[in-house]
Image (cartoon, grey):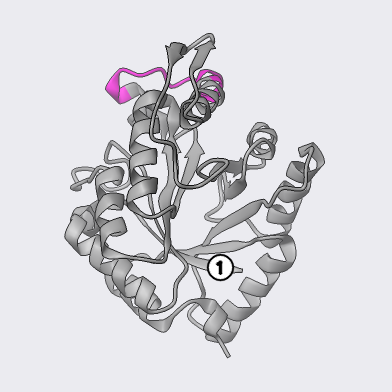
Amino acid sequence: MRFAINVPNFGDYADPRFTAGLATEAEEAGWDGFFVWDHINAAYEPGSPMADPWVLLTTIALATERVRIGTMVTPLARRRPWKLARETVTLDRLSGGRLVLGVGLGYPPDLEYAALGEAADDRLRADKLDEGLDVLTGLWSGEPFSFDGEHYRVSDVQFLPTPVQQPRIPIWVAQMYPHRRPLRRAARWDGLVPMHETELFPTPDQVADALGAVQSSRSDDRPFDVNVPVLLPPSRSDAAKLVRDYEEAGATWIQVGAWTVDDLRAQIAAGPPAQIA
């Protein structure tokens, strides 16, 4: 089991120097990852300052040496996959091969898409996500690449350099439990980020159910990560039990957030739950 800190890209965390400082603190305290949200409109704090997640991750990459970094998660349907290919490869090389790309549909669709003149239909966004992943990984290959899809077309282009990580930068797919299409999508890639459509977080039983569905759709035994977002209870013993329950359900990562900056800094300083005696 590995443990990460998870922060939004708005509010106090919109200051790249401040957030990079938190990532440094997390690395020094023994955390394994530092992930940021990817929102473009002020969905949760209207009027709040926001930062571009890729600029945030650049400052984090320069401020750290060991922790995994990445977006949790990027709504690929509102991005051009070739632009994202350039951003991710550049960041993977800058960080020495520490990048993870989390992907999903994006939430809430009215603010992340419709308010900005983008189509918010769930099925359309899902189709663009699947095509976008094929384009993205084709461009990561470094080989001449063409693609003729319903939403994206690429004609004999070659993107260099390639990522440090091979065969590719890990792709973790978000699921809003209990939806099943994201689980079939995740089975094609390298990991799952289980969330819940109506509750704050999925339960261990729901994580086990989702992972079982993914495994039934996989055709190989490549390593597969399950990164569960949680709020740890204040009691260290309760936190330890919760981590054990998620680990038994198949989680390989726990990513931890907090409601306030002070609470998050205290969580960072306390170290990952693996250090609970």
Measured along the vertical axis of the image, is residue 129 above or below residue 9?
above
Indicate whether 9 appears above or below 5.
Answer: above
Give how far across and how far down residue 148 sits, in percent: 53, 8
Q: In this image, 257 relative to 233: left or right?
A: left
> Residue 95, located in which quarter of the rendered image?
bottom left
Residue segment shown in magenta? 115-127
**Which of the pair 41/59 is nearer the observer?**
59
- Does residue 107 appear in the picture of this structure? no
Residue type indicated by callout 1: Arg
| Residue, far bottom | 277
Instruction: Identify the residue at image location x=74%, y=67%.
Output: 248
Q: Pointer 1: what residue?
A: 2
Residue 24 on the magenta span: no
- Work out which quarter of the rendered image holds the N terminus and state it: bottom right
Please say if 73 is above or below 119: below
Can residue 87 be seen in the rendering of this structure? yes
- Closer to the camera in the image, 248 or 157: 157
